[in-house]
Amino acid sequence: MDIAKLDQNFRTDLQLPGEVVFYDSRQPPFTGYGLYEYRSGAVFRRMPQDRADAVSPGVGQLCRHTAGGRVRFRTDSKYLVLRAILADCVWMGHMAFLGSCGFAIYVEREGVPVFCKSVIPAADGHTGARSRVEGVLSFPDRRLRDITVYFPLYSGVEELWFGLQAGASLAEGGRYRYETPVLYYGSSITQGGCASRPGNSYEGFISRRLDCDYINLGFSGNGKAEVAMAEYLAELNASVFVMDYDHNAPDAAYLEQTHERLYRIYRSKNPAVPVIIVSRPDFSSDPRSAGRRSVILRTWENARKRGDQNVYFMDGEQLFQRNDPAGADCTVDGSHPNDLGFFRMAEKIGAIVEQCLKNGEA
């Protein structure tokens, strides 16, 4: 059964609203965020390919997934057409196709980006397939609007074009209040698995609430704090650094070898940047969680003993809790957060990020 034939709201084919002029999103005045050298390259990337390959084959592949990528612009067009070519589509049974392969369009209202439209490939694709994505967002009137578009969390993007009404104005979008990005490093949870749409990773929630830029360097199954990765992270300009790779360490012994080492390498190059250390959010799902947390907590304790007052510990056991102590409704599979889980992570981690950003203004 083709549900789109029964309900027009589920159609994914493109119905152009009128005369459309297309613009390449890599060209000014479009501004890219969260991606490495946004204006160049055959595909969009989160870090240099040679540096990613030097970390591991997995990071070499996953750096082409566009988690955390965004583009901003301003237009008075009465409609917006999004047209993209995905280098590959990643289909997963436990993650919404929109989250892994789609785009999410937000329009600013009273200074806050508000979700308005999702755009996904046709549902007849398969993992690894090169796919075309098209969608239209229509507005009730013609006036200037600031628009933010989030890239897919688990797919590569080769091209992204925006179609506007002929004669419409096009200008650079608004800048973030906190322009120096918050840097996140970690696992599939950090990358955004399994958010229902790209803007619903915990970093996305934090970014919109605090109006801060960010870089998502979560690598699904491959956030293992290798020295090459630590050295790359230490080179990036960041306002806050969030260490969130507990899930990808094979065991507590591996954390012992790598966790404090990552902190020390980063801190040696960035003595003034706040560091937030996070343990796994699905604490109750694995009896080994307490032992892993002890290792992570020790990194924080040792840093404080050495006089570092700009390092913070976020206990993952607290991230999902509210009225359900075990956080049973916060994941899709006992491990990866759903939107509720990511929202709660954003509340707790975001509160520390906010404190750090405000301290930086003082």
Image: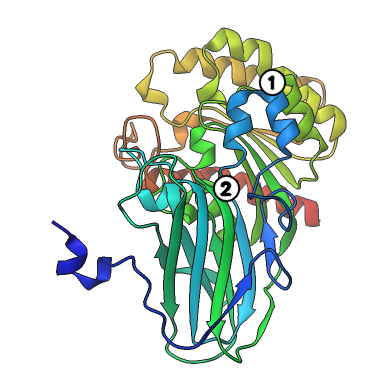
Res. 309 in view: no
Residue in the picture at 30% in, 38% down: 93
Label 1: which secondary element: loop
Res. 76 in view: yes
- Dot placed on the residue nearer the N-terminal end, 2 or 1: 2
Label 2: which secondary element: loop
Q: Nearer the viewer, mark 2 or mark 1?
A: 2
Residue 185 lies, in percent from the top left, at 63, 35
126 relative position to 21: left or right:
left
Quarter containing the N terminus: bottom left
167 relative position to 347: left or right:
right
Residue nearer the viewer, 354 or 42: 42
Q: Are marks 2 and 1 in contact (CB under 8 Å)?
A: no
Residue in the picture at 42% in, 50% down: 99
Residue at mark 1: 226
Name the residue furthest top.
253
Looking at the rendering, which quadrant does residue 243 occupy?
Answer: top right
352 relative position to 139: left or right:
right
Q: Residues within 10 Å of mark 1 (few under 14, many from 20)?
A: some
Please state which amino acid type lies under the numbered disc 1.
Answer: Glu
Q: Residues within 10 Å of mark 2 (few under 14, many from 20)?
A: many
Please state which amino acid type lies under the numbered disc 2.
Answer: Thr
Residue nearer the viewer, 97 or 342: 97
Relative vertical location of residue 194 with respect to residue 219 in this rendering, above or below = below
236 relative position to 98: left or right:
right
Instruction: Give me the disc on residue 66.
Output: 2
Residue nearer the viewer, 225 or 319: 225
Residue nearer the viewer, 347 or 244: 244
